[in-house]
Image (cartoon, rainbow, N blue to C red):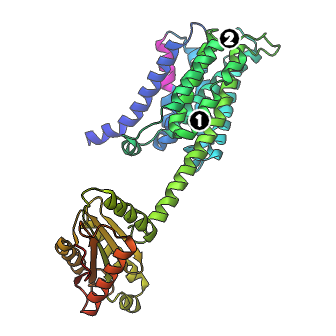
Amino acid sequence: MVFLAQSRLLPPLLLFGLTFALTLGGILARPIESLSLFWPVNAVLAGVLLRHHRHANVTGIVLIYLGMVGADLLCGSQWRPALWLNLCNLGAVVTFWRLLANLPRRHRRLRTPHGVVRTFAACGAGAMVAASLACLMASPWFEQSLTSTWLAWFSEQFSTSVLVLPIMLTFPSLAALLRSRGQRIALSPLLMLLASLVVSLIFGGPGAIAFPISALLWCALSYSPFLLSLLTLIAGSTLIVAVAQDLMHFSMPQSEVGVTALMSARLGIAMLVLGPLVVACVSNANRALLARLEHQASFDHLTGVLTRSAFTRKANALLEAHRQHPDRPALTLMMLDIDHFKAINDRHGHAAGDQVLRECAQALQAQLHDGELFARLGGEEFAIVIPGLAPAQSGFTAERLRRAVQELQIAGGVAPLRVTVSIGISGCSEQRPMVDLDALLLDADKALYRAKAQGRNRVEAAQRQVM
C-alpha cells in the first residue's frame, strides 16, 4: 500500500519538479529587469500535457502554476508580481493545450500539413492570451506602454512556442529511437544549414534572417519532422540571440506602435519555420506511403511472405551472383503445394483455407534462415530458394519442411485440420552454372507434379541432372 501511494504521488511530483526547474532556469537566464530573451517553459509544459494526458487535469494545472510561482519567489520576486506574471504564462500553457488536445493524433504529432497549421495557430492564440493577460494584470510592473508590452510578450511567446512546441509534439518514443539507432543521417543538409547561419551573422542586415531558409528546406526533405524541429530551434534561437546582441546589425527605427528590431526579427524567424515544417511532414508522409506501397508490392497480404514479383526479382539477383561468382556456389529451388487445398476450401470454407495458408506459411518460415527466399507464387503454391545448398544435399531440408507442415494442427470446426505438402526440388551447382529462373521453376514444377502423382505428402527431385 505504501508503494502504491508513492507511485501515485510520483508523477505529480515529477510534473511540479519539471516546472520548477524549467522556470528557475528561464529566470536565471534572462537579462536583469527585462523580459526573457527565450522562454521555452510554456511550450515545453504544454507539450508534456499533450503527450501525457493523465497530467492534463485541474491537479496538473495547479501543480504547474505552483511550480512557476515557487521558482519565481525563490529568485527574490515579490509575491504579487510572481502570482500575476505566472498567471500569464499559465494562460499560454492552457491555451496551447486546449486548442491541440482534441486534434487526431496524426495531426497533433505534426504528420500532416493541417497539424502544422493548427499548431502555428495555437501558438499564435496562446501568445495573444499571455500578452493580453500581461497588459490587463501585470502592467503596473512594466514601464513601457500597453502596446509595447503586448507586442513584447506576443513576439517572445509566439516565436519561442513555434520553435519549441514542434519538438515536444514530434519527439519519438523510446521504441522508435531504438529502431532508428544505427541509421545513417545525411550530413550535407546539416552542414549547409550551419554555413548559412555563419553567412547570416557575417552578412548581417534584416534580410539575413532569411538566408537559412534554403538549407532548412533541404533539411525538411532529408530528415524527420523531429530532427527538423531541433534544427529550426537551433537556427531560430541563434538568429534571435544574434539580433538581440546586435551581431547582425539588424537596426530599424522605432515605430509609432512600439515595434522594435527584436520583435520584428522574432516574428519573421517564427514565420520562416512554417514552410520547412510543412515540407517535412509532407515529405515524411510521402516516404511512409512509398514504404507501405513497396511493402504491399513485395509481401503477400495474407501470409506475409514474398510476392511472386518480389521473389522473381530477388531470385534473379541470386542467380546473377551465382553466374559471376568464380566458385559458382550451389543453389536449391523448391516448389511446394498444399495437398487437397481445394477440398479444404469446399468443405470448410474460404476462411479456413486462408487460415491454412497463414499457418503453413508460418511453419515453413520458422524452418528457414536469413538470406533464404520464401514466396507465395499464387493460390496454395509456394517457392523457396536456398543459396549455398546443392540440390543433391537438399533432401534433409525438404523433409524437415514437409514434416513441419504435417505436424500442424489447424483449428477448424469440430476437429483440428491436418494438412500436408508436396515438394519438388531443382537447383544449380558447379556442373550446371548457366541456368535461368524459368528453367529452375520448370524443373521444380515437374518434380512437384510427380510428387502429386505418386501419392502427395512427399519430396521429389528434378530428373534433369543439376549437379
Mark 2, residue position = 142
Question: What's the amino acid at mark 2?
Answer: Phe
Q: Nearer the viewer, residue 346 or 69?
A: 346
Q: What stretch of residues is rendered in magenta?
A: 66-75
Q: Residue at x 68, y 32 (%)?
A: 124
Answer few, some or many: residues within 10 Å of disc 2's Cα (few below 14, many 20 plus, some between 14 and 19): some
Question: What's the amino acid at mark 1?
Answer: Trp
Point out the tag, 2 or 1, that comes first from the N-terminus: 2
Q: Residue at x 31, y 79 (%)?
A: 444
Q: Which mark is residue 379?
A: none
Q: Is residue 39 visible?
A: no
Q: Nearer the viewer, residue 324 or 303?
A: 324
Residue 390 placement, left or right of 144 = left
With respect to residue 136, does 377 lie above or below?
Answer: below
Q: Secondary structure at mark 1?
A: helix
Q: Nearer the viewer, residue 183 or 434?
A: 434
Q: Nearer the viewer, residue 174 or 374?
A: 374
Residue 327 at x, y percent in the picture = 24, 58
Residue 223 at x, y percent in the picture = 52, 38
The answer to whether residue 69 is magenta is yes
Mark 1, residue position = 218
Residue 275 placement, left or right of 413 = right
With respect to residue 193, does 399 lie above or below?
Answer: below
